[in-house]
Structures are given as structure tokens and as C-alpha cells.
């Protein structure tokens, strides 16, 4: 809940600052009549609209789970990011159209020095705010904040490119550079929008996050306990800023309920320390079988049926399988 509120506060700042920067770019456009600056201002319009959508999605995602939404409301962030990615792509297409028209029907530019200074100021603010949004989004597992931050960063890159083009025009007087620069960064926006849309659809469809799973596998291998004979059927589902993990943990068959639960608590605490308090972990405990003896490292086991041979290294492949681990030559 606290992370949800923190995300919401940051998104409010993103929207408020986005409105101010948009107004500054509009002023710069009327001063210069540069189509490149106009396209930059149009993208800022998308920033504001997408920011408002992100703000609403974070407001929804921050709500506690209820009877109708037992896993919370975090999926709203994926929908927000999908809309934002679509808007960025549409803005890129519109920028290319306007820039092409400007190449065919060039317009005289004026007061480029003032325009360059105003646009440079917006680029610096956008980059700082975007970097902070991405950092906090990764920290709190918020796709909406990450999408907003990357959008602001892409806006910064396009703005710097536009500034370079305006400086060249100012120094050389070559007018067609204005439209050419705008077309180049229109394509960059389309690619950025595609990436955001792709990640949001992956979240909506519960696509496995390979990078996150690899980190979890490495963590489990590093802190493996002797009573954790194997872990299998590992799955991770993202609900916005919340992670839902479930797996099967094999422990010695003679453990009572309390002893098995202590091992589950140790596993839960290990994963929560690494991936945050918003994680939910559901662990099903299994008792070991005779074929588990050759891979079991427990030294004080009094009921061992077979000698220990080798420990099986946990990998993403064998942890995700729905069967207990055993050596390949075991019956």
C-alpha cells in the first residue's frame, strides 16, 4: 500500500511538470515557427494525456484487494502502459506526416536562439524526471511509472536531437534540416511506443519474466538450505507492482507440520528480502521419496535409503517443471 501511494504521488508530479513543459514548448513554437519544435510540443501533449491515464491507473492499482479483485488491482498499470505506448506511436506517425509536409512546403524560421534555450530547459527537466520515474518504477515494480519515465526520456532524446538540428539551421541557414530532424525522431518515437506496448501486453497475458526468474533462481542457489531437497513448479505472475510466486518445496518426509512450515517461512523471507514486501508467496510442501536420496545433501538424515551422489543445480528449466528432481539414471 505504501509503495502504491508513493507511485501515485510521483505520477502527480509527472503530470504537473508535463503540463508546464508543454506550455513552454508552445511558446517556443510561436517564437520560432519551427515544425521540429511543434512536433516536440505535440509529443508533450501525449505526455500529459498519458500521464493522466497513468495517474488514474496508479490510483486504481493502489486500492487494496477486495472480494471482486482478490489479487488486487495492479493489472490496471498494464492497461495504462498499453494506452501510453499506443499514443506515443500515433504521435510518431503524426510527427512524420507534419515533417514531410514541411519539407514539401518549407516555412521561414525566426528567433531560433530563444527557441533553442527554452527547448533545452525542457529537455533537462524531462531527463531528470524521467530517470527518477524509471528508478522508482523498477524499485516498486510499477510498469506505469517505468512507462512514464521512459516516455519522458525518449522525449528528452528527441528534444536534444531537435536542438542539434536547430543549431545547425541557426549556423548554416539550411531550412530543410528542420523537417529531416523531425522525421528521424518520429521513427524513434514509434519504436519507443512499440517497446512499451509490447511489455504491457506481456504483463496482461502473464508472460514469464525471464530476467526476474533468472534472478530468483540465482538467489535460491546461493542461499540453498540442506532441508530444501528440491524446488519445482516455480511460477511468477505480475499484478502491476505486486508479484505472486508459487512453487513446490520438497522437504524430508518425516518433518512434522511445524518443521515444514519453518522451511517455507525461510524460503518466503529470502525471496521477500530480495524482491520486496509486495510479494505474495504460495508454497506447497512435498515429502521426499526414495529417489530423492542420491541428490539430498542432508548429513544427519537417519532414514536415508540410498547414498548421496550429487547435488542437482537448480536452473530455470528444472525449477519450472512440475515434477520432483532426480538423477537421470534413477528409475
Image: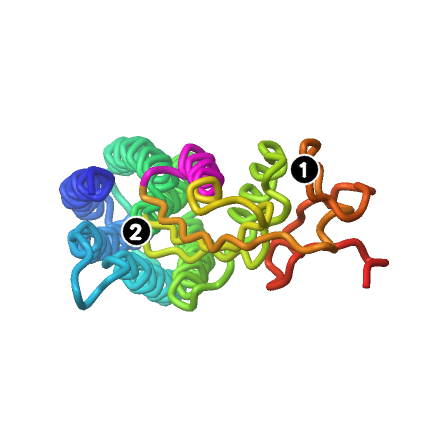
Label count reads 2
Q: Residue furthest right?
A: 329
**Residue 238 relative to residue 42: left or right:** right
Residue 26 appears anywhere in the view: yes
Q: Which residue is mark 2?
A: 144
**Residue 175 relative to residue 302: left or right:** left
Q: Secondary structure at mark 2?
A: helix
Q: Position of residue 84 (x, y in %)?
A: 30, 59
Whether 272 is among the magenta residues is yes
Q: Earlier in the sequence, mark 2 or mark 1?
A: 2
Placement of the C terminus among the 4 image quadrants:
bottom right
Q: Which mark is residue 301?
A: 1
Is residue 325 positioned above or below 136 on the image? below
The residue closer to the viewer here, 268 or 170, is 268
* Circle 1 crowding by C-alpha within 10 Å: few under 14, some 14–19, many from 20: few
Q: Position of residue 291 (x, y in %)?
A: 74, 55
Is residue 91 positioned above or below 113 on the image? below
Q: Main secondary structure of the magenta part?
A: helix
Identity of the residue drawn at 33% across and 38% down:
277
Q: Which mark is residue 180?
A: none
Placement of the N terminus among the 4 image quadrants:
top left
Colouring used for the render = rainbow
The residue closer to the viewer here, 270 or 3, is 270
Residue 54 in which image quadrant: bottom left
Residue 182 in which image quadrant: bottom left
Amino acid at each position: 500500500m505504501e509503495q502504491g501511494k508513493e507511485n501515485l504521488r510521483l505520477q502527480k508530479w509527472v503530470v504537473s511538470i508535463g503540463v508546464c513543459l508543454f506550455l513552454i514548448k508552445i511558446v517556443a513554437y510561436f517564437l520560432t515557427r519551427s515544425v521540429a519544435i511543434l512536433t516536440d510540443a505535440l509529443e508533450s501533449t501525449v505526455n500529459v494525456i498519458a500521464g493522466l491515464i497513468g495517474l488514474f491507473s496508479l490510483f486504481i492499482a493502489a486500492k487494496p484487494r477486495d472480494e471482486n479483485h482478490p489479487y488486487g488491482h495492479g493489472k490496471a498499470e498494464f492497461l495504462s502502459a498499453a494506452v501510453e505506448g499506443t499514443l506515443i506511436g500515433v504521435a510518431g506517425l503524426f510527427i512524420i506526416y507534419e515533417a514531410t509536409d514541411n519539407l514539401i512546403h518549407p516555412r521561414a524560421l525566426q528567433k531560433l536562439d530563444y527557441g533553442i534555450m527554452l527547448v533545452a530547459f525542457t529537455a533537462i527537466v524531462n531527463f531528470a524526471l524521467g530517470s527518477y520515474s524509471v528508478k522508482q518504477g523498477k524499485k516498486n515494480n510499477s510498469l506505469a511509472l517505468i512507462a512514464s519515465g521512459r516516455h519522458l526520456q525518449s522525449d528528452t532524446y528527441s528534444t536534444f536531437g531537435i536542438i542539434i538540428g536547430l543549431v545547425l539551421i541557426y549556423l548554416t541557414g539550411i531550412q530543410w534540416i528542420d523537417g529531416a530532424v523531425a522525421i528521424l525522431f518520429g521513427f524513434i518515437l514509434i519504436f519507443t511506443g512499440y517497446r512499451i506496448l509490447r511489455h504491457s501486453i506481456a504483463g496482461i497475458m502473464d508472460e514469464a519474466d525471464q530476467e526476474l526468474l533468472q534472478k530468483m533462481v540465482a538467489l535460491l542457489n546461493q542461499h540453498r538450505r540442506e532441508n530444501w531437497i528440491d524446488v519445482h513448479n516455480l511460477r511468477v505472475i505480475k499484478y502491476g507492482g505486486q508479484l505472486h510466486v508459487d512453487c513446490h518445496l520438497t522437504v524430508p518426509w518425516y518433518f512434522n507440520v511445524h518443521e515444514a512450515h519453518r522451511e517455507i517461512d525461510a524460503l518466503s523471507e529470502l525471496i521477500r528480502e530480495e524482491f520486496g514486501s509486495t510479494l505474495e508467496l504460495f508454497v506447497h510442501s512435498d515429502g521426499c521419496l526414495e529417489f530423492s536420496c542420491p541428490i539430498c545433501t542432508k548429513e544427519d538424515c537417519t532414514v536415508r535409503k540410498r547414498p548421496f551422489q550429487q547435488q542437482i543445480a537448480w536452473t530455470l528449466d528444472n525449477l519450472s517443471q512440475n515434477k520432483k528432481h532426480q538423477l537421470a539414471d534413477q528409475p
